[in-house]
Image (cartoon, rainbow, N blue to C red):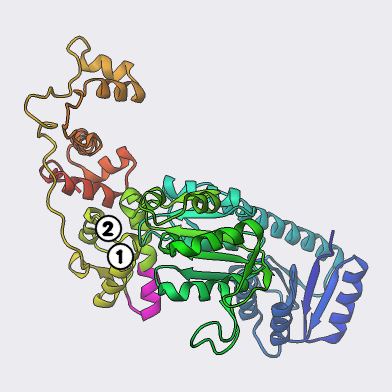
Amino acid sequence: MPKARILAIDDDTNVLDLMQFHLRKQGFEILTAQGGEEGLNLLAENQVDVALTDLRLPDIDGIELVGRFKEASPETEIIVITGYSSVIKAVEATKAGAFYFVEKPVNYDELFVLIDKALERREQNSEIKNLRGKLSDRSSYYNIIGSSKAMQNIYEIIDSVAESEANVLIIGESGTGKELVANAVHYKSPRAKKPFVKINCAALPKELIESELFGHTKGAFTGAMKDKIGLIGQANGGSLLMDEIGEMPLELQPKLLRVLQERVYTSLGSDKQHEVNFRLICATNRNPLESIRDGLLREDLYYRINTIEIQVPPLREREEDIQRLAEHFLRMFADKYTRPVQTLSQEAYEKLFTHSWPGNVRELQNVMERAVLMTKGEAISAEALPLTSIGPKPAVDQPLANENRSPIVIPEDKPREKVNRDLNFDDLCRLLVSKLPPPGPEDDQPNIFERLEGGIVQAALERTKGNKQAAANLLGLYRPRLYSIIKKHNLAESATID
């Protein structure tokens, strides 16, 4: 086990010498400083497990120093030493973040016990931090914001494959955060400290992609004034992200396939082969199978790049993340532009939840940036959100579809009391589906999940006599989410109590 490192700060050199003697004898590694600034400099340059500091220093007050230490190195435990017995000072020191408070002259046997306890707490805090990082309900992951089940699945996939060399294909609509997922794969991998090179195949003219990707020699084409290392060469040892891989010219795809198979490439205008070692991460906003069908993507290249596939859901399919994302962007832009904005109004939340978000997370980010800039007070109003309002949904008491369809009912031979007592949730779902009429030829089946959403909220409001907070608690929903469902299904008349 490595020795614990102790930093001792005191303006009395005799005290420091004595501390150094006793602590080294006990097996600790010790650094010494005669003032607060010198101690802070040593802290910046070294990992310090425990700091011992006098309360009275020539340059910095001891209490202030404790605060600055905890700010610079939260993991370092601090024991304050003073020759001035004071309960008030002890309380101030511990409030500032000190582990404990001892008096001069120091009893070193007692000090060693304190140091051992401080080291034990430091280790416990480190273990707790690591455990929290491994929790399955993470709300953020390598700058990706989201705690929905869909995002948790993505985090688990990245955890499982990042350490490998497998090629990764990320599929999702524009604005869903595919590049953030690619970043997480790279920065969680053993290649994290190596280059991460990115190219957008849709952003470059077709005649330049080959040169950008593979590099060229001087004179290889008009305007090639000197040799150039391509992006593949720059990514050697690291990772290469090819965004919009479906837009890569078809004639270049065999050359990329050869690089992936043989790990060698040749620059434009050269016959010399260069060995290369990189991890390929591709992204696309198109269905790759449709791209293959349309002749835009080679099937053999698709199978080569798609060792691991990650599907990033659109924002409309993870509505539970909207509030968390909106509040994240609010804080980010409020800090960036030094605005007093701290929250969103209830009407603003409702407007966010009823929007369809065709531009996904990128659209939400832009909306929140504008809202922060347009808001002068502490709360963002609905009017500050530049969104097109969505028309009202059909009321939940309308029939499922055509009039000749049978409504969903509980059979007469099962009284309501018996159903509630004997049927569990799965039974109720099976009963519901069993009563759905089969769709006829070319018949549009209604969205049963939307009907259920409105019906369940309606039932919850009836049970709570219109108390929306109680209904939200009953269903396990955020209150803004409940409000959006009420508005979506025109349930306002049943929900009158806040």
Q: Is residue 127 visible?
A: yes
Residue occupying the point 57% across, 54% down: 167
Residue lying at the far left in this picture: please name it.
403
**429 w.r.t. 195: above or below:** above
Say which residue label 1 marks: 363
Considering the numbered disc 1 on the image, is that residue within a helix, a strand or a loop? helix
C-alpha separation, residue under disc 2 versus residue under disc 1: 7 Å
**Contact (CB < 8 A) between labels 2 and 1?**
yes
Could you tell me what secondary structure mostly forms the magenta stretch? helix
Q: Which residue is mark 2?
A: 357
Instruction: Please name the amino acid that badge 1 sits on.
Output: Glu
**Most foreground residue, 50 or 331:** 331
> Closest to the observer: 207 or 318?
207
Residue 337 is one of the magenta-drawn residues: yes
Q: Quadrant of residue 344?
A: bottom left
The quarter of the picture where the N terminus appears is bottom right
Amino acid under disc 2: Trp
